[in-house]
Amino acid sequence: MLLRRLRGRSLSLAEARTALGGVEGMDDVLIDEVLAKFVDLGYLNDEAFAEQLAMSAIERRGQGRRAVVQTLRKRGISREVADAAIADLPDDDAERALDFARSKARSVGGKDYDASLRRLAGQLARRGYSSSVSLDAARQALAEAGVRRAPFSRPAPSSGVRFTPDE
């Protein structure tokens, strides 16, 4: 059963343990023996798996470090292994965020600069970039795309509701 699961996609040790725990007749001792055998054969390796996931998240999906750590933790990778995988990544979050922001600047750009900035910065934040990196990249990409804040103009007319003091 575990071999079949590993053919479909890589698993962490925690995911493999969970999968084996669902098999009828498997106790903790037997699960530990099977996992040890799979580790010895090289089928399960959390360090290599974490590096693979981290590089995939960075290169294919353009995610930031926070999103990568979240993905690793969700897949059952220990904090120490996740930290080591993150430490090996290139420190180019700002460049990747700006590349993504440039690709999306025209689609979020509208008449309202502030709304465009919020949308683009929100997209970057959901990809796992820090708020400062997201805002800087969004501002620069919007400026390069020609989306600018409108000069100050007269305030919009009021709704017509007036509040008067009680007499």
Image: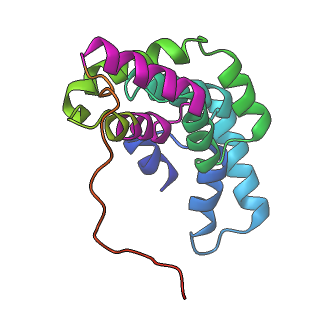
Give the percent coordinates (x, y) of residue 142.
32, 21
Q: Residue at x 27, y 25 (%)?
A: 105
Q: Is residue 103 above or below residue 33?
A: above
Is residue 111 magenta-colored?
A: no
Give the percent coordinates (x, y) of residue 121.
44, 34
Q: Residue at x 62, y 31 (%)?
A: 41
Q: Residue at x 50, y 28 (%)?
A: 134
Q: Is residue 25 above or below residue 137?
A: below
Q: Quadrant for residue 157, please give it.
A: bottom left
Residue range of the region highlighted in magenta in the rendering:
118-146
Quarter of the picture holding the C terminus: bottom right
Give the percent coordinates (x, y) of residue 57.
46, 29
Q: Residue at x 59, y 50 (%)?
A: 74
Q: Is residue 30 above or below residue 162?
A: above
* Chief secondary structure of the magenta portion: helix
Q: Nearer the viewer, residue 114 or 54?
A: 114
Q: Quadrant for residue 87, please give it.
A: top right
